[in-house]
Amino acid sequence: RKEVEQDPGPFNVPEGATVAFNCTYSNSASQSFFWYRQDCRKEPKLLMSVYSSGNEDGRFTAQLNRASQYISLLIRDSKLSDSATYLCVVTRTDNFNKFYFGSGTKLNVKP
Amino acid sequence: EPEVTQTPSHQVTQMGQEVILRCVPISNHLYFYWYRQILGQKVEFLVSFYNNEISEKSEIFDDQFSVERPDGSNFTLKIRSTKLEDSAMYFCASNPPPPGSGTDTQYFGPGTRLTVL
């Protein structure tokens, strides 16, 4: 089983829509969780860390469900500029320095 | 805002040649990493480096690969004898030091696209 799994998409949504992505992780010893954003042929850029209590940053909300071993990302009021691939990233308690990446979920926001 | 830099942005080489990819991590960061991403695939961990030594490496990081921090600012990845399957985007990353929140957040450089012919 893969360490981190994501629906590859693509998710095609109109501007202004709300869209949600899920990500599941297989190792219960997972410690830290992140959403990164990656534009085509560019580096991953941190979108937000995911905290146990859930957290929000503007139009973006991240949730963590440790019991079910999944994290989610909700984007409200989608903008054209949100079009990108969203990467779920997990670290483990035995090695917080090693990032395990999901394959990413592609989002296309259309006018 | 400080950022990780990498050179070159694109490297083309012949199979069997040696390449060195260069990175300058953010200046006060202590942990350094190399990742690679084959076109259309996920980002994969290669190696982490702390206190002038490798702290962990993946199964991809075989004897053909080595890393070095030759001075106080550069962090390099060397591939001794490149293979076709080494063609990928190589990202360098670094962590801010503890204590404090976000110390496990990694900041990525823009990558070096390696093409092996």
Image: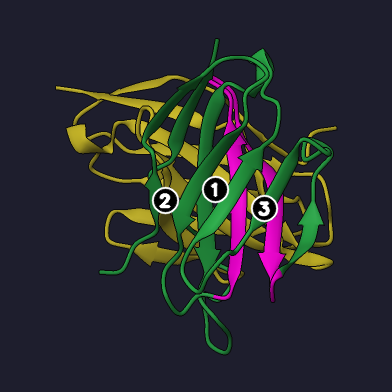
Chain colours: A yellow, B green
Question: What's the mark number on residue A72?
Answer: 1
Residue B59 appears in the picture as rendered: yes
The answer to which image quadrant residue A55 occupies is: bottom left
How far apart are the alpha carbons under marks 3 and 2?
16 Å
At x 55% / y 81%, what residue is drawn? Answer: B97
Residue B37 drawn in magenta: yes
- In the picture, which quadrant includes the C terminus of chain B? top right
**Which disc, if any, is residue B109?**
2
Q: Position of residue B15 (x, y in %)?
A: 63, 15
**Res. B106 visible in picture:** no
The residue stretch that appears in magenta:
B30-52
Look at the numbered disc 1 and give the secondary structure of its residue: strand
The answer to which image quadrant residue B83 occupies is top right
Overall secondary structure of the magenta section:
strand
Pointer 3: what residue? B67
Quadrant of residue B62 within the rendered picture:
top right
Mark 2: amino acid: Gly
Q: Position of residue A56 (x, y in %)?
A: 39, 64
- Front: mark 2 or 1: 2
Q: Is residue B93 left or right of residue A76?
A: right
In front of the other: label 3 or label 1?
Answer: 3
Q: Secondary structure at mark 2?
A: loop
Pointers 2 and 1 within a single chain: no
Q: Position of residue A14 (x, y in %)?
A: 23, 24
